[in-house]
Amino acid sequence: MKLASLVGMVRLSLARDRRGTLSSAFGIAVGVGALVFFVGLGLGVGRVVRERVFPVDARLVEVVPPRVSLGALLGGGRLDQETVDRLARLPGVERVFRKMAVRVPAVSRYDGDFFGARLRMGVELVAVGVDPGLVEGDVSVGAFADSGPGQPIPAVAAHRLLELYNKSFAPVRKLPQLSARMVSGFIFPVEFNRSYVTSSASGPVTRAQVQLVGVSDRGLLAGVTIPLATAVRLNREAGVEDSLFSGATLQARDPSEVPRLVAAARGMGLEVDDQERRMAENAGAAVALTTSALALLSLLICVLAAVNIAHALSAAVRARARDIGVLRAVGASRADVRSLVLAEAGALGLIGGAVGTVAAVGLSVLVDWASGRYLPEFPFKPDSYFAFPVAVVLGGVVLGVVAAVAGALGPARRAAGTDPARVLAG
Amino acid sequence: MIAAHGIRKSYREGNGSHVRVLEGLDLEVALGEFVAVVGPSGCGKSSLLHILGGLDRDFEGRAHVAGTELHALDDAGLSRLRNEKVGFVFQSFHLLPHLTALENVALPAQFSPGWEPRVQEERARKVLQRVGLEGKEGRTPARLSGGERQRVAIARALFAQPQLLMCDEPTGNLDQETGAGIIELFRSLHRDGLTVLVVTHEDQMRAAAQRVLRLQGGRLHPEGQS
């Protein structure tokens, strides 16, 4: 049977029973629509978690000295330059970025114009120095290098800190919303050897200025990231430890090398700070689990729709037995009859799948619009909660066809087995 | 055109017993012949037609139709035979209700390669014109009279230019006047060279046939003999 003939006969057959066609296609549309909607929601929320809430680079491993260590007595645990060199020589390591916390307390007291608003506040400031290579790709103003005493200290802030400021702090304090471009170049004062929370500060207070030179996903979340040389200098000037590193970031050549690097670092008596990665994984797993449960429910709807189609087509095959006999009399083979029933189901699935997918995408646009219009701002609030890769969209349509055709297998077999001599007699 | 020998056919009844309707039946129909088969209801006339038309494969004996041994054909082969060489006309017309007259007539083209849409339509219009239904191509069966429906059914049977027309009580559902028109149409088709095998009760149809055979006791006998 020619494809054009098959299409033409299916079109006529579906047009013959519009109500039945709509009913069968509706079931498929509901199932496919729900599936596409929930999978799109899961992928969208997962993307927000992965890219904005926990932007974990799959190639990076955070190595820190052990919290409790017998140190050099057992030949491990210290994170000095020699240990860093050993880490750099590990197979699979592309680069090592050293980190050193500024080990003297610091505060920032700001009193003045803040992007057009009046701001008066003081905060405890945490700073960590890093090898410039870790963040220099995100620097947009000047250079990320130690500029020496008396000069503003270049610093990078975290994207997430900016997000928390914009969505939580700024609205409450009626401060302006800031973008990465706006804050780059901003200068604020800092006082070292001063603290609001600890009495351990000692020595004279020294004043400096910090200039934000960029915003990065690799920046310290609750503080500022400064050049390593500056951190070493500040520690040295304050007379505190300035040769041991507080951490090192290993950049693997490939994400698949990461487990081996983790094991090697632990073998050297060091610890791996994978809290961020674990939180990302846990959040991702929670999203995936919820999505899977909803997708499973949607699949169940598709199965029910397929059963509905099976019943509807079975009834149609019984009701049209004489018509099938006529087709056989004018030259239709059993295979032709089987193809006709399956093609009719496929068309129902195609219609239902396409309508369901379009409805799901339409509903997602509505949800995003309603979120933007009615939900208050909150940190990491996305512009869209959904992601619809081509595979999901096409998969929805294909699922509709597969479910419908699967439901039609039995009726198609029965239709093909119709005895024309019996149904045409009399 | 038809050579059937030793045809036997039986049906299983509800209680499991077998009822034999054809008992070693022999039939030969020459090319271009017009043969009528008569007999009481339930004697197996329709069964014979279904067997010879390739609709029923469950029989014993040997049957050649249009030069082909039916038992040698598989389902696809029998379907091709029905599509290209045999045209059926039924008592109840058996038109598809959701199709127009033109679409009903062109139905055989849907199961045969080589029929371009334009050619299909031209051919369907031509056969509808041949059976006297010019101008009614777009009507569905519900908007046609009984006689017109049967003419559409005949046009459908003629669509693929078959060698053999098999008719099962073609005037059984028509009034006498309308039936007479249909019989005249068969006469005309026969004059054009078509081989016609018709199962009938109608005296007029008997009169139109060149040869009348009576099916009795599962076998065919020339009319007047038993």
Image (cartoon, coloured by chain):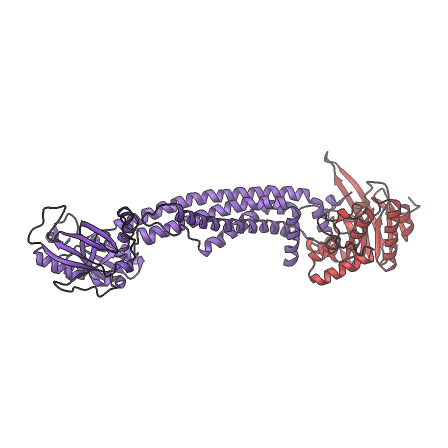
Chain colours: A purple, B red
Residue ranking furthest to the top: B15
In percent of width and height, residue A264 lies at: 22, 55
Q: Say which quarter of the image contains residue B79.
A: bottom right
Q: Is residue B105 left or right of residue A310?
A: right
Q: Is residue B187 left or right of residue A357?
A: right
| Residue at left offset 21%, top offset 65% | A143
**Is residue B115 something one can see in this rendering?**
no
Q: Say which quarter of the image contains residue B112.
A: bottom right
Above or below A86: residue A345: above
Q: Quadrant of the N terminus of chain A?
A: bottom right
Seen from the viewer's position, the closer of residues A40 and A123 is: A123
In percent of width and height, residue B145 lies at: 81, 47
Q: Is residue A134 left or right of residue B100?
A: left
In percent of width and height, residue B5 lies at: 81, 51
**Is residue B106 something one can see in this rendering?**
yes
Seen from the viewer's position, the closer of residues B29 and A289 is: A289
Q: Quadrant of the C terminus of chain A?
A: top right
